[in-house]
Image (cartoon, grey):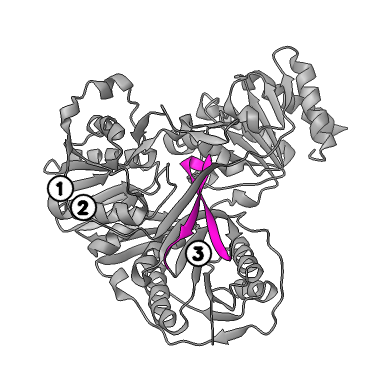
Amino acid sequence: MNIKSLIISDNQINFLKESLTFVNKNKINPSLLIYSHEKEFEIAKEYGANYALKIEYNNYIDKLCLTSGIINVIYKKYNFNIIILPNTVFGYEIGPRLAMKLSGSYISNVIGYEVRDDLIIFKKLVYSGIGAELIKPKKIPIIITIKEGFEEPFPSPNPLIETLNIEKYYENKYSEGIKLVKQEEIKIVDIRNAEKLVVIGRGIKNKEDIKLIKELASLIGAEIGGSRPIVTDYKWLEDYRQVGLSGITVKPKLYIGIGVSGQIHHIMGMKDSKIIVAINKDPNAPIKEHSDYFVKADLYTFVPKLIKELNALYKK
Amino acid sequence: MKVLVLTKPSFDTTLLRVDPKRNEIITKGVPYHINDHDKYALEISSLIKQKNPNVQIIAIGIGERESKDSMREAIVRGADEVYFIEKIPSIKYEPYIYANILAEAVRQLNPNLILCGTLSEDYISSSTHIFLSEILNWPIVTNVINIVNLTDSYIIVDRKRENIIETYEIKLPCIIGVTSGIVTLKTITPIQIMRISRDKVKTLNLVNLTFENTIEVQALIPIQAKQRKRVFIDGEKNMDEAVKTLIDNLIKEGLL
């Protein structure tokens, strides 16, 4: 059996579609998927994985030890050229470890690639997203973490996907010195899938003023998000609402930025939105360059009028 | 107890611009500062020190010669000592190489705990500290949102990963990557930094270190922004008209 690529999905469906499209398009197959959820297996069939290996674990450390242990064993057998991981905490944590262990090249935050003379050159995001480095890996295996948007997903069904069974191997060193004391699941709102998003920035003067923005959001059926200062510095919104490089990436049909200046860190998290509206009293705010509609106005005057007009519109 | 804070000097990426004629990123003249995410690690270490007066905070950074002065900010944010390792211009510093150099510094400085931010704003990497843990064979927990307790032998932290909060007890020595937001950053003025004597940043000389690159950077290119409609609506001139214009356009776009 000859396996060329290994994909570890970490329950990231879009990642799985994009990475499988990439390996099939560039003939870096047969591919093997390591997965844990049935939904991932279904996507793997639809997007043409050749082999699948299911792993089950009790907690995060267990998952890290198990995945690493299994890869150690199967790499010796199959010698993959490439290991593809998502830009998740798990991807970021296991990628460098695998690179060290397997003496490979590690490239994180890959946003695209070019094929030149049968070589794949990876495009890696740098400088808060204003640029990209074109990188040629010098060692095999190549271990990459990819950012959503890396590849346009294209189904390539393979109902004959073969399931592998491999004995459990643990890389126990990742549990040495670390004891999980407790684990708690919390409720979060996933704004990544919101069709409309109203995002607030530093133009909002007080936490109490957010209720005005919430009123607007509720009227148009939008979720609320925030820029980094609002979330990390002022803590006026929950961290899962932070849009940007160190928060989450969104691409709603409608993004409305209110009092958002548009620093590059923030733009990186919303630049793929379909329509971008910015309401800002500073006509030189960087977000203007990235907007479809830029409204130069004081939000405290404009937003109440907008709410009033929308209410009138919806009553008709 | 020695707490080593990984403090990367970086371009202030908010000031980087693209030269549209040459299609190049302009880095010349862009000032250096401490990587935004590492500032949180510095300030949380300062809070740790308030509770544990025997803690000594040492900041360390690797950077271009011109970035050395920016490390003075670490003192303002609470470091007792600051070390700087100057980059050799002929070497391409990838995270794996940074980690190997830092590992050598760790062997010299002998800390009990290493703190760092979880991301570098210039290279957008979350990997140097992971490589470092692998080289040193120290346990690591990243994405830490709260430090619950620190003793001479262990640290207890809360870490957030998507919708799960995990509490870990980790044996020292270990590495902890903290998230932005673990503390509220102090506002620091350039004057406060300039008041710190340059001599406070000591150069750490590590000799005879050679490492092989695992990647080759072929080019740095700007990322093209998506073309937008760029409709300007002047709400200051006529607010009612501006509201109407925006609503009409959003209706046409099929969004209302």
Residue at mark 3 to residue at mark 2: CA–CA distance: 29 Å
The mark closer to the camera, 1 or 3, is 3
Give the dominant element type of the magenta stretch: helix, strand or loop.
Answer: strand
Q: Compared with residue A49, is residue B163 higher up or lower down, i.e. above or below? A: above
Image coordinates of residue A89 in percent, x first then y, are 44, 58
Observer able to see residue A186 = no
Magenta segment includes A68: no
Which of the labelled discs sits on residue B2, or is there none?
Answer: 1
Evaluate whether label 1 is on the same chain as label 3.
Answer: no
Observer able to see residue B36 = yes
Evaluate whether label 2 is on the same chain as label 1.
Answer: yes
Question: What amino acid is at disc 3?
Answer: Leu
Evaluate whether label 3 is on the same chain as label 2.
Answer: no
Badge 2 crowding class, 10 Å Cα cut-off, few under 14, some 14 to 19, many 20 or more, is many
Residue, disc 2: B113
Per the image, label 3 sits on a secondary structure element best described as strand
Q: Compared with residue B125, is residue A264 higher up or lower down, i.e. above or below? A: above
Which image quadrant for residue B211? bottom left
Which of the labelled discs sits on residue A76, or is there none?
Answer: none
- Residue at 88% x, 32% y is A316
Indicate which disc, 2 or 1, sits on the residue closer to the N terminus.
Answer: 1
Chain letter belonging to callout 2: B
Question: What amino acid is at disc 1?
Answer: Lys
Magenta segment includes A119: yes
Residue, disc 3: A85
The residue sitting at the top extreme is B237
Q: Which residues are magenta?
A: A118-139
